[in-house]
Amino acid sequence: MKLLRLWFGLSVAVRRREYLASGVALMFLKVLIDNALALKATGKIWPPLAYLAPSWTYKSSAIGPSPSWLLLTMAFVALPFVWIGVSMSVRRAADAGWSPFAGLLFLVPIVNYVAMIVLAAVPSSRTGASWVPPPPGPYRARDEAPASLPKREMEPGVKATLMGLLASISLGLAMVTISIYSMQLYGAAVFFGTPFVMGVATAFAYNRHVQRSLAMSVALALLSVIITGSVILLFAMEGLLCLVMALPIAAALAVLGAIAGWAMARQAGARTAHLMVAFLALPGLAEAEHQTASPRLHEVTTSIEIDAPPERVWPNVIGFSELPPPPEIYFKLGIAYPMRANISGEGIGAVRRCEFSTGPFVEPITVWDEPRRLAFDVTSQPPSMTELSPYRDVKAAHLEGYMVSRRGEFRLVPLEGGRTRLEGSTWYTLAIFPEDYWTIWGEALLHSIHGRVLSHIKRLSESGARD
């Protein structure tokens, strides 16, 4: 129980011996879990040096292609380790007599290794400054305005609320502008770092002079994320669907940041100027990410079994008639979906056009192995979606050039009884980081698109229809 309070709580000060021992033990535990998952999914393990790489691209290259469930599982596994690292680093910094904001260096790639080594080495403060445990509950009486306060002056609680929201929302909008519209980067600094620091800023400003409720601090942090998203939607910077996809991770990180900011607010070494340093560090992290991030090639394969031989399936692969309207809600909300396909010519060099709801994919044929395999490149493609927005036309930056189909392939595998297993594959790159999170959405949508096409080919082939 004491160990759990040390790792997950906020009431226990962290000395350098406890910090070092916990760090080493948790590092070995995390490596063990990661490699067990990677071994089960791919048959490979990560070399130790891969953990020093700041980019997932470099890490994943050591094990090659991996299933999407591996990314999702590792993300959930990483969350408690991230919280332990942040909370212990913040408390260790305070115990050393530093600003607890120095503990947030744990979240900065590459710098975090240096920060952890230093925090494990420096002794506790000799001046008596140390971690002050946050109170078990809010000081509600102190939220009220003093009796001598003039009627026209804003109450302290209201002022603290507005200051917290203002600081957080300003940071969120500034980072969206700098990273997406200046650097053309949808990166981890925006999706991970910014929501966390927004949570810290909201709770810190709200509790800076009077320790208030943790629940209210968390609620304000979530409100700041929702307001920021609403402003982005209002000014047509992004559409609703993309904001909804980003919300789960943004909300979770804002909550963790709010808890840390709430705990740091009453520390003697925590100053507003130090919070501004955290603000200014985010654009620097975005620029570093912009210089190093490189999208990797992903493959998504979907298959279906058809009660017809390959010779009857083939004509419906190279071109197919109009598909019925999609019933899935996400297609109705704007995700691009296939409608029909036709081909000009025959054999290698023929050009296939797959019409989507947002425009055509132009696909020159690179392999024509009738009736076993059809492969093609993608030389032109439409936007990946039509943004759901109060406005008629939203030109979000990510609609073109960020999720790019590179090539595709159909394979017709003959089965017993004159049946066929039809496999459809798409190779694509995703320049939205961190890829670990966004590929979960991307692969789910591609499987749905594949399934729509394959099911239509199955109906046509089994009914004996021809395009």
Image (cartoon, rainbow, N blue to C red):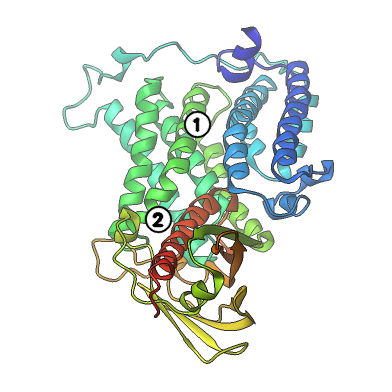
Which residue is located at x 31 percent, y 57 percent? 233
Q: Quadrant of residue 205?
A: top left
Q: Quadrant of residue 64?
A: bottom right
Q: Which residue is mark 2?
A: 242
Q: Can you tell which of label 1 and label 2 is closer to the viewer?
A: 2
Location of the N terminus by quadrant is: top right
User: What is the three-letter code of the residue carrying label 2?
Assistant: Cys
- In the rendered view, tell whether residue 89 sits above or below residue 67: above
Front one among 338 and 109: 338
User: What is the three-letter code of the residue carrying label 1?
Assistant: Leu
Which residue is located at x 64 percent, y 34 percent? 102
Dot 1: element: helix
Front one among 446 and 277: 446
Which residue is located at x 63 percent, y 39 percent? 107
- In the rendered view, tell whether residue 39 sits above or below residue 297: above
- Give the left or right position of residue 205, taking residue 77 as reference: left
* Residue 244 at x, y percent in the picture: 37, 49
Q: Which residue is mark 1?
A: 256
Asked whether the residues under the numbered discs 1 and 2 touch, taking CB atoms below 8 Å apart as contact, a structural biologist would say no
Dot 2: element: helix
For the residues labelled 1 and 2, the Cα–Cα distance comes to 22 Å
- Give the left or right position of residue 273, taking residue 341 as reference: right
